[in-house]
């Protein structure tokens, strides 16, 4: 395993979560503890082991290319924090 | 030192399905914003994706058309990044186990055959569309979740023109295969272009510069025509290029560096737990392979070989698949396949365009939409393909003049009658009786002393005027070749 | 008092027109009125809507008579605030969903409606089902009806407390690492986590998609069987739902477990196991022997790795699942100068500490350079854990363990130590990793303290019939399930 060093500020930024300084500090020590605990997985020999992504052995689950009703326009926008002209409004996207 | 460009492309193509990739909303362009959305494609709390089997089929079909391997197992992954047009804030895509890989595309370029290796063609989903206002942006999710094929090449291209040719060849294959309509106006095809430069003869790749989100092939060409010299000039100046992302400004005609998104490349791929893997059955693949149509380039080559068509004609019949499909069955029965191609390409196509234009005008005057047109092309012609074959054979053996042939064709289009019946009722049969033509020639010579004198004085062109007179006397029915011959004989003699 | 009765009792009497759905519903509403100010199992509920559904049920029964095909007709079932109910709020006990109203029904809700159930109320939980105590709710902590100073367990704490306090007849919970079984054990109810894929997850707000399962919390095992029959089955909207036919689960409750092989996993004798809990579970095992079961010791050698594996896989999946809560299309929004700022502020203000902790952990284990060491390795260990169970089920029909190492702890006791909290899920977590089924049934009380203790029974994939048969046989030979909390 890798040693448990977590750059909380960087990861929080990746996760788009703003943290207060005290939150960040607390998380640093808690996550260090948790990561130290999960280090134990490093002791296991997993070579040749298939990873399990699903607990059930299904394959080829698909649907026919058929149309289903969409939401009524009002329902689609019903929960929008901000909307105008049928669009979800956000702060200006700059590339 | 001379430099060369190394170019690779990632082309995103919307698949031609009825519904979206994970839900039953319509995959349809042009609806009012946020009317083709449902809990699934809006990523409301609690929803799950279910894969569209037609999108999976079209992906595998594309793989076969691009000569790809079809791995025994494919899966979907979540590509995590936050962006307002991505409803889940992850995109479902195929990361390490794509549906197809390791193929190639062949196409004609500069008179030779180019081959570009295809790294992979994998299935993913489109995002919503943003509109930008002064201080805000607005998002429409109608496009979110539309099935998107990403076709990635190896860095095998070397110039703007060659890249352009590749894109056209790819588009042609996808349209031929019914994979996508590739309508650029509707944003159905978009590409990211990776380009670097290196000294000619070296192998190591230079710093890869990506030009993102190009939505026209000509734009790609122009962007490369700008970007390649820019990079070469920079390297010549001793600048060290670094990997970066640029945008093409079509109006200014320049590429410019994009503000690089922080952490943009830490996508934290994760196998999608909500979708099961896909394992295409062998017999299904065999069937699909058997039902594949011929690739456009192969068709062109075969048309030239089997029917001795000139490259230009074969190109036209390749480009217009319906026209090619109309041509081939009758060409196989024809003694004059070259002439037949000529008639289809020049005369029949002109008639079709005429009818369509007329129909459009009528539709417009009735206030109907273009897609309600009754006449959509070859399939709606009133006469049988074998009638056209008969017509061309008549012309070929001289039973009908080329000009009369045109008249007959127009009547076939209008009434659907067989050409022989039309020739008879209109009295258009060509006169190839030497005696009758001699009489007409004598008449013309007698009536046109000036051209006769001119010809005799050495003006070859004067013969045409006389020929015209004979044709006129015959009301167009005289065999023109015989007229020419007889006139010459008489005037020399 | 009708609210104290089981589904099977009430439906028998409904069928005979002895009682009405309105009376049942009213008795639940009265009880809520009486105790929920203290228990705080419900986040919200709508008495008028519940009574209207009850009246409709009574009219249906009057018109068509009792219909076996609609086995929950007239029964109030309360729902954990993590399932989408059309035109109702859905918050997952989080601030981030703001005033969100779901425009659609979860498949489980549709099935309950089709069976005639009265869908009533939203039950408290740990925010986004992340927690083991319901202390992580943004709307206050639910209390254990047996001791209001204690936690009811979690994350389906509201679901268990509401059933235990007789504020509903049955409830729906969800179980990602024990979130049905653990609160059921701590509140003295029956909690069933079905095989992964048995019940459609469509409409369940995902925490960890490969581990989440919906399941019932009920007053006895027969009710759990009944609810499972209603909820199970293949759903075309959930690619992970299994196509296996749905057995008539209640019909399999024969009471006979003679010759049935029961395995006791050696590794579950952990240092933190409370002696009272151990005593009750040992006694329960003796009971099973008395009923004719063959008991033997088995080994699940990778048990010690389950918690670590779970917290990597669950948090990684959660980090992606919870990315959609961004303030763009729904939920609360804290504005920003650009979208990135809007996201960070909204999510910073909208998520509680445990959710942030898990999203950040999950983001970290997937981030560039760490994927193989954490996530991929955890998936491989998951294979080992699953294989342990599949091997064990070659030899035995079911496994029996304590549901939790201790009875309900005090509110606030573990709140500052997340790792200790995680470790309290040690007996329930492997079941989700392996995708198998499990149930918790009451098996005694601590003394002193009088706190419920749960017996966990685990079965192989799709082994619910056997699981329920064992649980039922045990339950019927005891009186534990009949005890009521001292709550007036
Ligand atoms: Mg892509
Ligand atoms: Zn949709």
Image: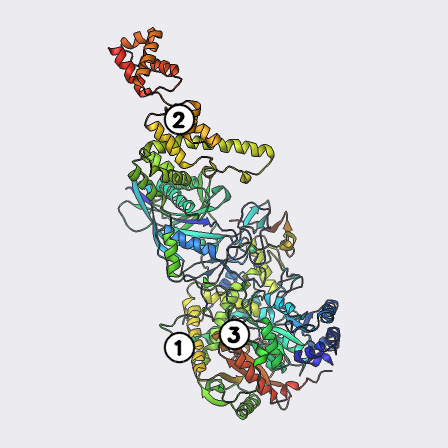
Which image quadrant shows ligand 2? Answer: bottom right
User: Label 3 is found on which chain of the structure?
Assistant: C
Location of residue C183 (image quadrant)? bottom right
Q: Are there few (<14), some (14-19), or many (20+) residues within 10 Å of tag 2?
A: many
Foreground: C123 or B391?
Answer: B391
- Disc 2, SS: helix
Q: In this view, does C312 lie above or below B411?
A: below
Location of residue C387 (image quadrant)? bottom left
Q: Which residue is drawn at 59% across and 54% down?
A: A70
* Residue to which mark 1 is pinned: A43
Q: Which of marks 2 and 1 is in front?
A: 2
User: Label 1 is found on which chain of the structure?
Assistant: A
* Residue to which mark 2 is pinned: B405
Along the horizontal axis of the image, is B318 left or right of C64?
left
Instruction: Report if residue B182 is visible in the image.
Output: yes
Along the horizontal axis of the image, is C410 left or right of C197?
right
């Amino acid at each position: 395993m890798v040693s448990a060093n977590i750059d909380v500020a960087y990861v929080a930024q990746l996760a788009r979560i703003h943290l207060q300084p005290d939150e960040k500090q607390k998380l640093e020590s808690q996550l260090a503890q948790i990561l130290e605990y999960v280090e134990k997985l490093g002791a296991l020999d997993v070579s040749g082991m298939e990873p399990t992504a699903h607990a059930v052995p299904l394959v080829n689950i698909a649907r026919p290319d058929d149309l289903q009703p969409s939401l009524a326009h009002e329902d689609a926008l019903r929960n929008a924090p901000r909307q105008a002209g049928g669009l979800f409004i956000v702060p200006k996207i700059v590339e | 030192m001379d430099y060369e460009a190394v170019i690779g492309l990632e082309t995103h193509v919307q698949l031609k399905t009825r519904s979206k990739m994970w839900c039953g909303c319509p995959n349809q362009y042009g609806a009012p914003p946020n009317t083709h959305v449902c809990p699934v494609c809006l990523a409301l709390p609690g929803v799950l994706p279910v894969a569209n089997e037609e999108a999976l089929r079209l992906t595998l079909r594309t793989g076969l058309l691009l000569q790809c391997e079809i791995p025994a197992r494919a899966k979907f992954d979540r590509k995590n990044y936050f962006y307002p047009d991505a409803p889940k804030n992850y995109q479902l895509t195929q990361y390490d186990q794509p549906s197809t890989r390791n193929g190639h595309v062949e196409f004609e370029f500069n008179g030779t055959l180019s081959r570009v290796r295809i790294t992979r063609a994998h299935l993913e989903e489109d995002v919503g569309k943003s509109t930008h206002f002064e201080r805000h942006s607005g998002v429409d999710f109608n496009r979110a979740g539309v099935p998107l094929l990403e076709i990635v090449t190896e860095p095998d291209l070397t110039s703007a023109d060659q890249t352009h040719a590749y894109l056209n060849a790819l588009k042609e294959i996808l349209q031929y295969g019914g994979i996508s309509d590739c309508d650029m106006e509707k944003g159905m095809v978009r590409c990211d272009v990776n380009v670097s430069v290196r000294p000619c003869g070296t192998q190591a790749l230079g710093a890869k510069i990506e030009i993102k989100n190009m939505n026209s092939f000509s734009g790609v060409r122009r962007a490369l025509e700008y970007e390649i010299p820019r990079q070469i000039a920079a390297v010549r100046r001793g600048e060290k290029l670094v990997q970066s992302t640029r945008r093409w400004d079509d109006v200014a005609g320049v590429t410019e560096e994009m503000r690089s998104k922080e952490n943009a490349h830490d996508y934290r791929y994760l196998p999608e737990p909500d979708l099961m893997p896909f394992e295409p059955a062998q017999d299904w693949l065999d069937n699909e392979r058997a039902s594949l149509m011929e690739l456009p380039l192969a068709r062109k080559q075969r048309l030239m070989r089997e029917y001795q068509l000139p490259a230009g004609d074969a190109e036209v019949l390749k480009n217009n698949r319906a026209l090619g499909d109309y041509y081939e069955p009758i060409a196989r029965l024809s003694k004059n396949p070259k002439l037949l191609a000529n008639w289809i390409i020049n005369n029949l196509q002109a008639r079709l365009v005429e009818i369509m234009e007329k129909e459009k005008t009528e539709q417009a005057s009735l206030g109907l939409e273009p897609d309600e047109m009754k006449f959509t092309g070859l399939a709606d012609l009133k006469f049988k393909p074998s009638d056209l074959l008969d017509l061309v054979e008549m012309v070929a053996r001289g039973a009908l003049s080329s000009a009369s042939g045109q008249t007959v064709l127009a009547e076939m289009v209008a009434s659907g009658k067989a050409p022989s019946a039309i020739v008879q009722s209109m009295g258009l049969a060509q006169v190839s009786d030497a005696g009758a033509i001699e009489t007409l020639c004598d008449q013309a010579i007698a009536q046109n002393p000036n051209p006769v004198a001119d010809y005799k004085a050495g003006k070859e062109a004067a013969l045409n005027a006389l020929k015209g007179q004979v044709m006129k006397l015959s009301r167009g029915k005289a065999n023109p070749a015989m007229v020419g011959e007889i006139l010459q004989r008489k005037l020399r003699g | 008092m009708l609210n104290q009765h089981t589904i099977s009792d009430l439906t028998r009497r409904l069928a005979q027109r002895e009682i009405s759905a309105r009376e049942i519903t009213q008795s639940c509403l009265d009880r809520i009125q009486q105790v929920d100010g203290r228990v705080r199992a419900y986040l919200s509920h709508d008495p008028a809507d519940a009574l209207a559904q009850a009246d409709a049920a009574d009219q249906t029964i009057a018109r068509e008579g009792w219909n076996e095909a609609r086995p929950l007709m007239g029964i109030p079932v309360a729902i954990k605030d993590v399932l989408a109910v059309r035109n109702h709020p859905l918050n997952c006990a989080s601030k981030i969903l703001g005033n969100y109203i779901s425009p659609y029904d979860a498949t489980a809700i549709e099935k309950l409606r089709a069976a005639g159930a009265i869908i009533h109320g939203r039950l408290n939980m740990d925010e986004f089902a992340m927690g083991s105590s319901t202390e992580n709710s943004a709307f206050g902590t639910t209390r254990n009806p047996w001791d209001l100073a204690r936690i009811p367990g979690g994350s389906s704490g509201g679901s268990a407390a509401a059933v235990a306090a007789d504020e509903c007849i049955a409830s729906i919970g969800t179980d990602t690492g024990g979130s049905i079984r653990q609160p059921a054990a701590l509140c003295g109810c029956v909690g069933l986590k079905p095989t992964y894929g048995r019940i459609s997850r469509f409409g369940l707000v995902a925490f960890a998609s490969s581990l989440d399962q919906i399941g019932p919390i009920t007053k006895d095992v027969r009710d759990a069987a009944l609810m499972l029959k209603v909820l199970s089955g293949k759903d075309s909207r959930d690619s992970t739902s299994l196509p296996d036919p749905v057995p008539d689960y209640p019909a399999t409750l024969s009471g006979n477990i003679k010759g049935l092989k029961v395995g006791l996993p050696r590794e579950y004798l952990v240092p933190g196991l409370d002696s009272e809990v151990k005593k009750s579970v040992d006694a329960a095992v003796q009971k099973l022997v008395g009923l004719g079961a063959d008991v033997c010791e088995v080994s699940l050698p990778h048990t010690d790795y389950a918690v670590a594996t779970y917290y990597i896989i669950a948090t990684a999946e959660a980090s992606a699942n919870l990315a959609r809560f961004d303030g763009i299309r729904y939920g609360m929004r804290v504005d920003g100068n650009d979208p990135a700022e809007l996201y960070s502020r909204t999510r910073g203000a909208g998520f509680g500490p445990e959710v942030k902790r898990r999203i950040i952990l999950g983001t970290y284990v997937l981030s560039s350079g760490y994927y193989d060491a954490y996530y991929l390795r955890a998936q491989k260990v998951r294979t080992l854990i699953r294989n342990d169970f599949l091997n064990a089920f070659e030899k035995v029909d079911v496994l029996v363990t304590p549901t939790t190492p201790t009875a309900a702890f005090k509110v606030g006791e573990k709140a500052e130590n997340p790792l200790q909290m995680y470790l309290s899920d040690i007996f329930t977590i492997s079941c989700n990793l392996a995708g198998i089924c499990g149930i918790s049934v009451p098996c005694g009380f601590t003394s002193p303290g009088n706190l419920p203790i749960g017996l966990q029974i685990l079965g192989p994939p799709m082994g619910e019939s056997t699981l329920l048969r064992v649980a039922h046989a045990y339950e019927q030979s005891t009186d534990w399930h009949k005890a009521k909390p001292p709550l007036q």
